[in-house]
Amino acid sequence: MTLRKPPIVATLLLVAGIAAAGLLAQTAPLPNRSGSLKFAAMGDNGTGDRAQYEVAQQMATMHAVFPFDLVIMLGDNMYGGQSASDYVKKFEQPYAPLLAAGVKFQASIGNHDRPDQVSYKLYNMNGQRYYTYVRNNVRFFALDSNRMDRKQLEWIEAALSGAREDWKICYFHHPLYSNATRHGSSIDLRVLLEPLFIKYGVNVVFSGHDHVYERIKPQKGIYYFVSGAAGQLREGNVASSDQTATAFDRDRSFMVVEIDGSDMFFQAISRTGQTVDSGVIRRQPRTTSE
Ligand SMILES: [Fe+2]
């Protein structure tokens, strides 16, 4: 009896074909529709080191094909010195192509950021530690997780309850959910904010602080992302848990996001241009404030 050998060459070609198809699919996970809201997200970026510049270059490369006009900054916008020359070296220079293209940066502040960053024109905070703004059918809330005092909590509640946009997106530095071992979840902050997020129907939350990328499975109906590796990196730091949808802690990264109607498409991209996560979130049905 003669056993037929598997057609190795054909099998390899098939595998290669599938891999190529997967790669092609990965290069365009965002629909890139005209009129949709397109933005990028980055955290823990401002080191002034080469790696920050390399991530910034990938952002510019992405911008050329996916013309986002907003970058949400998740805090630790600058490490070390924060003099005028540092603003040039750690922000204006690496992101010069985006700034020249008219991309607007909207910052939140992290634990390494000096309080006077709120007055830096190109962070568009208008002197406020926390603030809100609208793009298309989305209301963004940039919060200050360094100091979550009663005044800010009252402001958040009033701002959330008054929002009438389809989407409510909050961002701030310290993550409510994280499985990185360096910092992990900010439980004290979660106790304060999560009830408000649930009550007023926040859809998605972005944070940084842990120098990794992690997508958390929906927690009490809310999606959480940690994107804190646009300059810094804590390699191998994620200890995935049941909460982890996916994580990437091998290199630096940033995110691009597209919201069109009830869909939010997202893509996480590494320093070398690799897509390390992508997907789509359908806007959660809400019963409150709608
Ligand atoms: Fe931080």
Image: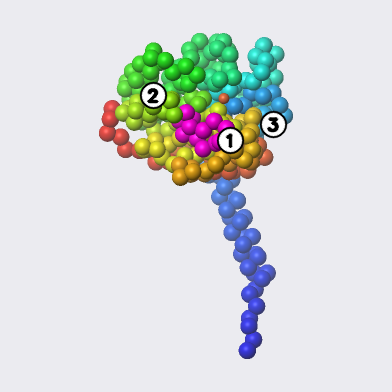
Figure check: 202 above or below 250:
above
- The residue under the point 66% across, 18% down is 80
How packed mark 1 is, by other alpha carbons closer than 10 Å (few <14, some 14-19, many 20 or more), is: many
The disc, 2 or 1, on the residue closer to the chain's N-terminal end is: 2
Secondary element under disc 3, as helix, strand or loop, is helix
- Report whether 52 appears left or right of 239: right
Secondary element under disc 2, as helix, strand or loop, is helix
Residue nearest the viewer, comparing 210 with 163: 210
Mark 2 highlights which residue?
192
Mark 3 highlights which residue?
51
The quadrant of the picture occupied by the C terminus is top left
The quadrant of the picture occupied by the N terminus is bottom right
The disc, 1 or 3, on the residue closer to the chain's N-terminal end is: 3
Q: Label 2, label 1: how many angstroms apart (C-alpha)?
A: 24 Å
Residue 96, horizontal then vertical, whole percent: 66, 23
Residue type at numbered disc 2? Leu
Residue nearest the viewer, comparing 13 with 69: 13
Residue type at numbered disc 1? Val
Residue nearest the viewer, comparing 275 with 245: 245
Q: Quadrant of residue 229?
A: top right
Residue that lies at the very extreme toward the right in this rendered image: 50
Mark 1 highlights which residue?
212
Foreground mark, 2 or 3, reads 2
- Report whether 127 appears left or right of 13: left
Figure check: 87 above or below 184:
above
The magenta segment is 175-186
Q: Label 1, label 3: how many angstroms apart (C-alpha)?
A: 14 Å
Foreground mark, 2 or 1, reads 2
Foreground mark, 1 or 3, reads 1
Secondary element under disc 1, as helix, strand or loop, is loop
